[in-house]
């Protein structure tokens, strides 16, 4: 059976089939998402629980442990790590790559509900969980600030308008706020004043919790009219709380203003964010899995002017970093390389065949095969990224081979005197099986990549499939369209050729003669040839052993990450001052762009740590690479006493569900906490002595000073005071305890 003859006899139908393939691929090309790398979803769940004022050990034992006990029973859980800090516990759950993230989230929700009875009853809110992808980073970071409005009002506009509206844009997955300064009413009590009045802090807390409510009241129904019932049960300002009666003494009311005061403030006064030299709020915008990163970023940027109209003119919104800048450049470079490759291949074909139609026919197979591949990529949910475009670039050399083999065999029959149609039918029948065998042999090369598991397999699966699809489509085109065009456009070969043809033919003949001479020499010295082969293989193996190895090349995508750390007993004001020094050093670098920063307790940070998000100028505007910039910043940052800055270039792929200050992590596990503390410090000091390592750090921070309150249980019992009352009083006094909630039409605030 001659498969190609069916299409050669039906040129119009063949043309329509090819036009359909090209049109479908062209439409799919416009719909394909753009990304730096293939989509690799890490099924990871981030669980966060907050108990303001609780020390890390309390959070670890009373909050993290009950949750971890339930999470450990979830199937396909590969890694579970927790981080307990002052008032917050964060648990990262990472599952098998094949586990469905939605199903894992349902299991996590059920585990949280099961652990609810074992958690502290005074948790302000139940533990929250969200699906995260640790390999993904914000596609755009925004800084919001104002010189005229207080920071809590700026936060109000960011939370109620900017973050919510951006979250609703197509392609946006989530919006995280760094350095939140939610408004709050802070009640400050004079301990001496309430002691003189015989009032405890628990009395004050109880009175504050009961004096403001926002509950249903019902309505009046008359024969002709109806009316809803409203009261002034809720207090919404600090001024109202100053007049709250907390007790009666000697027949007279005792107000908050008599024993202290109430002020309008913020929930967390121990955190600060910088939006490129201004105190403000930093927003990190993440995309949805599989969304077009460039289209999503453009939507966010285009929405900013419209959203600014809903806020006061004094509120400024700036773009601190745009992840798509380098993605656009890299994808554009790869696309340019692809076009150059196509042009070079066509030029080489023309150089060897030196005939117009003999060049055009295989030249048509290249764009048709590549564009048709876009259609299959769209069906498989792939993206236009560096690896898929690299596969298409490599495929340019493969997809043209089948067409050239087909044309050469057909031309051979034409030179023997057959007509174009007869030569096409004979040549296609003879070479058809060869093209099929070539195609399958090429695909077989990529079978190991297709079967490879783990993260590497996920990364290169798209590369292998894209290349394989392009080869299969090129084989189909070579068996159908190529012989059809040959039968229509290839005619009798010319006997007289121009000067260019003769010169090139003379050069090729010289190459053939030279090769023949060299081949004779090799055949005359067979032993030396075999020895040179063995030597080449040996040198290759030796070089393969000693060459530098790594998982993925270090990228320079114009974005850096900086983690800051100070002494564990540092005050917030001193931490903010040192963070500002580091901020100024980095921002003053000539190759640096805008920077966002956060310091203090909150957003995953402890009170002595912080983070910065430096962005570099575009490649054509800076004089050094990201690594060179980091190396010249390190000695300057090291001059800040008692302060460390860990700098690294942000990478498009991150392994593991746990964030760290440095690029690589080593996890030490143990059942005894004391032994774990000891050996972790031993390992830390030993690793610092290895010259190949730098920025060695640990996330175990247990050296902060602690004030121990020892309860005399007999005396307390004799005075009718329980340990619970002592804990509650200390919590009321020093824990920034949330004692009430203020509900508004747009948000809710807390009374602290």
Image (cartoon, helix red, strand yellow):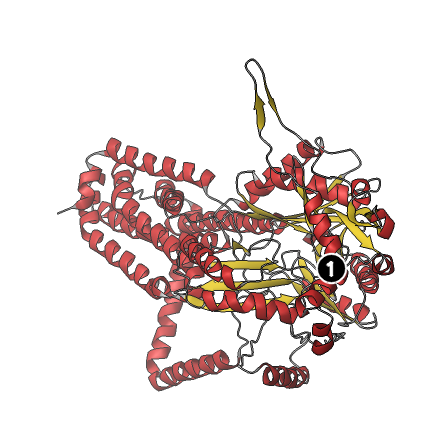
Does 6 sit left or right of 453 as displayed? left
Q: In this view of the protein, which residue sits in the foreground, 42 or 508?
A: 42
Q: Nearer the viewer, residue 419 or 466?
A: 466
Q: Is residue 17 left or right of residue 429?
A: right
Q: Position of residue 328 (x, y in %)?
A: 58, 47
x then y, percent, for residue 316: 76, 40
Compared to residue 595, the image places residue 308 above or below, namely above
Of residues 396 and 616, the one nearer the viewer is 616
Measuring 71% from the left and 30% from the top, which residue is drawn there?
309
Give the side of residue 454 with respect to residue 261, left or right: left
Observer able to see residue 662: no
Q: Which residue is mark 1?
A: 732
Q: Quadrant of residue 690?
A: bottom right
Q: How would you rate the neighbour count of disc 1 (Cα within 10 Å): few for under 14, some for 14-19, many for 20 or more?
A: many
Residue drawn at the location 28% of the way across and 41% of the way down: 481
Judge from the rendering whether residue 581 lies leftward or rightward of residue 142; answer left or right.
right
């Amino acid at each position: 059976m001659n498969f190609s003859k069916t299409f050669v006899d039906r040129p119009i139908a063949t043309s329509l089939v090819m036009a359909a393939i090209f049109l479908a691929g062209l439409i799919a090309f416009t719909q394909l998402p753009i990304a730096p790398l293939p989509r690799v979803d890490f099924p990871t769940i981030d669980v966060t629980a907050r108990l303001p004022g609780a020390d890390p050990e309390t959070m670890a034992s009373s909050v993290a442990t009950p949750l971890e006990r339930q999470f450990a029973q979830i199937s396909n859980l590969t890694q579970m790590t927790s981080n307990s800090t002052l008032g917050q516990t964060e648990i990262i759950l990472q599952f098998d790559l094949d586990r469905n993230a939605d199903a894992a989230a349902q299991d996590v929700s059920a585990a949280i509900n099961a652990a609810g009875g074992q958690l502290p009853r005074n948790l302000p809110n139940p533990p929250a969980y969200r699906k995260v992808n640790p390999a993904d980073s914000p596609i755009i970071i925004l800084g919001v600030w104002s010189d005229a409005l207080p920071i809590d009002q700026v936060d109000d506009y960011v939370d109620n308008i900017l973050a919510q509206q951006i979250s609703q844009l197509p392609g946006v997955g989530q919006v995280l706020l760094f350095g939140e300064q939610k408004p709050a009413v802070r009640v400050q009590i004079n301990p001496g004043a309430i002691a003189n009045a015989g009032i405890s802090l628990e009395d004050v807390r109880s009175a504050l919790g009961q004096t403001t409510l926002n509950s249903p009241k019902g309505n009046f129904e008359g024969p002709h009219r109806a009316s809803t019932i409203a009261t002034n049960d809720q207090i919404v300002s600090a001024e109202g709380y100053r007049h709250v009666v907390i007790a009666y003494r000697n027949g007279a009311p005792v107000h908050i203003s008599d024993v202290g005061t109430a002020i309008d403030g913020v929930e967390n006064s121990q955190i600060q964010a910088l939006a490129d030299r201004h105190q403000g709020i930093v927003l990190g915008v993440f995309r949805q899995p599989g969304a077009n990163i460039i289209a999503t970023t453009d939507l966010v940027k285009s929405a900013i002017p419209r959203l600014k109209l809903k806020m006061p003119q004094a509120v400024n919104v700036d773009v601190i970093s745009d992840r798509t800048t380098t993605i656009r450049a890299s994808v554009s470079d790869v696309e340019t390389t692809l076009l150059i490759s196509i042009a070079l291949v066509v030029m080489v074909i023309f150089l060897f065949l030196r005939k117009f139609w003999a060049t055009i026919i295989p030249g048509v197979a290249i764009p048709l095969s590549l564009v048709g591949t876009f259609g299959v990529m769209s069906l498989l949910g792939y993206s236009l990224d560096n690896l898929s475009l690299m596969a298409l670039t490599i495929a340019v050399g493969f997809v043209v081979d089948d067409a050239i083999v087909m044309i050469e065999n057909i031309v051979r029959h034409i030179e023997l005197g057959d007509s174009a149609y007869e030569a096409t039918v004979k040549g296609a029948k003879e070479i058809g099986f060869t093209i099929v065998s070539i195609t399958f042999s090429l695909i077989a090369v990529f079978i190991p990549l297709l079967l490879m598991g783990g993260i590497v397999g996920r990364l290169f699966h798209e590369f292998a499939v894209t290349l394989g699809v392009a080869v299969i489509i090129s084989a189909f085109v070579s068996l159908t369209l190529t012989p059809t065009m040959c039968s229509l456009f290839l005619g009798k070969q010319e006997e007289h050729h121009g000067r260019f043809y003769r010169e090139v033919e003379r050069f090729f003949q010289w190459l053939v003669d030279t090769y023949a001479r060299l081949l004779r020499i090799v055949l005359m010295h067979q032993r030396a040839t075999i020895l040179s082969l063995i030597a080449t293989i040996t040198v290759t193996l030796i070089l393969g052993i000693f060459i530098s190895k790594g998982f993925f090349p270090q990228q320079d995508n114009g974005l850096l990450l900086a983690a800051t750390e100070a002494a564990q007993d540092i005050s917030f004001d001193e931490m903010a001052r040192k963070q500002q020094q580091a901020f100024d050093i980095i921002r003053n670098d000539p190759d640096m762009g805008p920077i966002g920063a956060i310091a203090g307790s909150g957003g995953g940070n402890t009170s002595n740590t912080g983070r910065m998000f430096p962005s570099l100028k575009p490649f054509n505007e800076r004089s050094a690479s990201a690594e060179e910039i980091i190396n010249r910043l390190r000695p300057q940052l090291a001059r800040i006493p008692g302060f460390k800055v860990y700098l690294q270039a942000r990478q498009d792929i991150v392994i593991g569900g746990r964030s760290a200050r440095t690029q690589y992590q080593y996890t030490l596990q143990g059942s005894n906490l004391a032994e774990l503390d000891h050996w972790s410090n031993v390992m830390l000091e030993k690793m610092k002595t290895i010259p190949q390592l730098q920025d060695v750090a640990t996330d175990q921070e247990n050296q902060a000073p602690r004030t121990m309150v020892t309860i005399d249980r007999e005396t307390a019992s004799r005075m009718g005071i329980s340990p619970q009352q002592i804990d509650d009083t200390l919590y009321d006094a020093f824990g920034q305890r949330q004692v009430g909630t203020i509900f508004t039409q747009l948000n809710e605030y807390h009374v602290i």
